[in-house]
Amino acid sequence: MQAFINVPYATLLLLLLTMTLVLTAGCHRESAEEPELIVAAASSLAPLLHELRPELEERSGAGIIIVPGASATLLRQLDNGAPWDVFLPAASSYAQQAAQISGCDPASRRAWARGGLALVQAPRFDDERPLRELLAATERRIAIAHPEHAPYGSAAMALMRQSGVPEADWSDRLIIAPNALESLRLVSSNNADAGLIALVLAVGSDLSYEQQPTPQGDALVHEAIVCSDGHASAARRLVDALRSPALQARLARYGYLSP
Amino acid sequence: MHKAPLFITLQVALAATLLALVAGLLMAAALRRRRSLVADLFDVICATPMILPPTVLGYYLLVTIGRESPIGALWESVTGSPLVFTRAGAIIAAAIAGFPFVVRASRAAFEEVPEDLIVAAATLRAGPWRRFFTIELPLAWRGIAVGVMLAFARGLGEFGITLMVAGNIPGRTQTAALAIYDAVQSQRDDEALMLSIVLTLSGLAILLLVKRMTPLRKSRPWEL
């Protein structure tokens, strides 16, 4: 063993072990002291939730960690054991599926807003074209969220199909982003020429936008569902806060309709 | 700039490197100087994290340690919390990514140790463990250390497997790589840039260290 002990890197490894133990211990203490609600939200909601965070924290009585993502991805993660206390997908169908998952309370499902779509165009263009013209007569590439993972993506697809322009004319000009937030980023960075994105994201961005007709049915009805083990009452207070008149008024400023 | 992702990254990378070191060293020691179909098969399997898409590894890992799996269920029954979507999950993800670097570098280093030294020790009645700890490990340490540093660097930048297995939970499982992705998506470009610079400089520093440690043939300790 003498030779091994003399190796200088044995000391380094020992140092690594010590640092890991110290860091790990520090982290466990940190998480034990501050109970927090993990709110898994459709990525279109992330900027809004960040803005509403102080009020939501005050009304729920808990800290809030916001985890943005495509609704389907977050649902899949929830099914695999992700510790979401509140799940806020962008379409009610995902909340309905979440209600089947062990740990989620079906009775806690509440609709709290209805989203809309907006057409945004990249900042480098001066001429703003309506959707139909954009689909029919230009070479411009249009960003949308993934239609299979993100409700705003599937709503955008439905809207484009309703435009009357044959799908063959525009389908190869679509840029499929992983989620709604990413589709906005593609347009604002000029990497896509236009985007059919969540209205709330368009309102909160610097881009000029054109609001599109609200999809029929419950395609973009936002529901909340509580899936919390330890913080169920705080999670319910957060859902109630989202439905409160004060916050509903603020949501309306972002283009949300009442559900 | 938020410090939490950097702190979590450091913690995850360090713990993952230790895991990869222990598992990788055992595997490398078992495979050294073996030339058989089984050994080659194990060698190839150990290397797969280097070439498989992170999503594939993430999927396998999710199936292997998820709540429905025997390992995940056992972990949850013992600890009371699932293995996935926790920092432990992030550590396992980064360890899987770093494991092949330790195995390959360590195995090569072990095989560079002159066999006559080991045979000589055996004739002096040194047992296999003693030979390993007093001859092979000391002479191979430089190669092993290179593997460890590469595994650490890989752990610092791990993204895909972590995203699938540990999620992207700020303050809990969100490493620097995930925070950069988040910041870019949310157009917090300053934060993304700062974190990217920190990760780039860390990676460059480690690679430079690896470069400086990689011995020239003349400088091997047993070639005096």
Image (cartoon, rainbow, N blue to C red):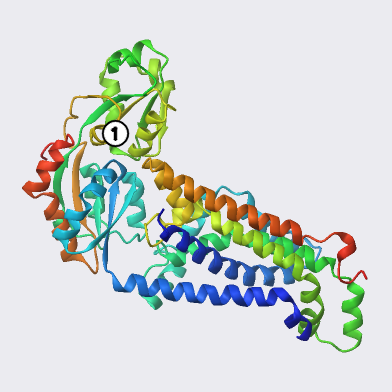
* Res B33 seen here: no
Q: Amino acid at mark 1?
A: Ser
Q: Give coordinates of residue B222: x percent, y percent.
A: 89, 72
**For the image shown, how many numbered marks are present on the structure?**
1
- SS of the residue under disc 1: loop
Q: Which residue is nearer to you in this view: B18 or A104?
A: B18
Q: Quadrant of residue B44?
A: bottom right
Query: Which chain contains the residue that carries disc 1?
Result: A
A161 vs A235, left or right, is right
B126 vs A183, left or right, is right
Q: Give coordinates of residue B216: x percent, y percent.
A: 85, 59
Q: Which residue is nearer to you in this view: A229 or B138?
A: B138
Q: Residue at x 44, y 21 (%)?
A: A172
Q: Give coordinates of residue B173: x percent, y percent.
A: 41, 60
Q: Residue at x 45, y 53 (%)?
A: B163
- Residue that label 1 marks: A205
Q: Residue at x 27, y 16 (%)?
A: A130
Q: Which residue is nearer to you in this view: A121 or A221?
A: A121
Q: Quadrant of residue B81?
A: bottom left
